[in-house]
Amino acid sequence: MADKTLIGLILAGTILSLAHNADHIVRGDIPWMPQSLPFLVVSLAIYAIVGVGLFLYWQNKLGPRFWAVVAGLGVILGWFGHLSPFTDQPPQYICSAYGSVAAGWLAVACLAALMLVLVAATIYATYLWGRQAAVAK
């Protein structure tokens, strides 16, 4: 049976990811075709994986292990994209990309919330996965 808390975390992460993608577009980080193709492909792949994953999870064809891996990969992608020492778009860059301080901080808060939800989803899905494995023994 699908866990409602995990589904809530997945939906919250999806909404925050959409908001973060909108932030990239508003900041002008996404040039028009063909330079935007990698961004579009990755974004569409993420939403396709989440959509198909939710459907299959609801049908009990996927378990929490799938979500632990997907959310964990999201944490890694977010870290490399915005928090690692190798990124060209750290939170300071995001803040300064807006004319309004409030808009910059809102964009950074959205990124922080996305990362926190992904970490929480990874931990919670891993917990469910371990509990499921213990019951199966």
Image (cartoon, helix red, strand yellow):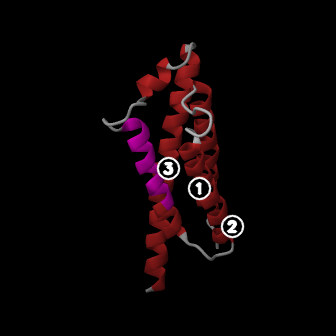
Looking at the image, which residue is at 58% across and 44% down?
37
Q: In the rendered view, tell whether residue 122 sits above or below residue 61.
A: above
Q: Is residue 37 left or right of residue 77?
A: right
Amino acid type, mark 3: Leu
Which comes sooner in the sequence, label 3 or label 1? 1
Q: Residue 44: x percent and y percent?
A: 62, 52
Looking at the image, which residue is at 62% across and 38% down?
33
Quarter holding the C terminus is: bottom left
Pointer 3 local density, CA inside 10 Å: few below 14, some 14–19, many at least 20? many
Quarter holding the N terminus is: bottom right
Q: Is residue 38 left or right of residue 123?
A: right
Pointer 2 local density, CA inside 10 Å: few below 14, some 14–19, many at least 20? few
Q: CA distance from mark 3 to mark 1?
A: 17 Å
Mark 2 residue element: helix
Tag 2–tag 3 contact (CB < 8 Å): no
Q: Which residue is mark 2?
A: 55
Amino acid type, mark 2: Phe
> What kind of secondary structure does the magenta stretch mostly adopt?
helix
Q: Which residue is mark 3?
A: 118
Residue numbers of the magenta segment:
70-83
Q: Which is closer to the viewer, label 2 or label 3?
A: 2
Instruction: Name which quarter of the figure residue 84 lies in.
Output: top left
Q: CA distance from mark 1 to mark 2?
A: 15 Å
Instruction: Name which quarter of the figure residue 6 lies in.
Output: bottom right
Which comes sooner in the sequence, label 2 or label 3? 2
Image disc number at residue 45: 1
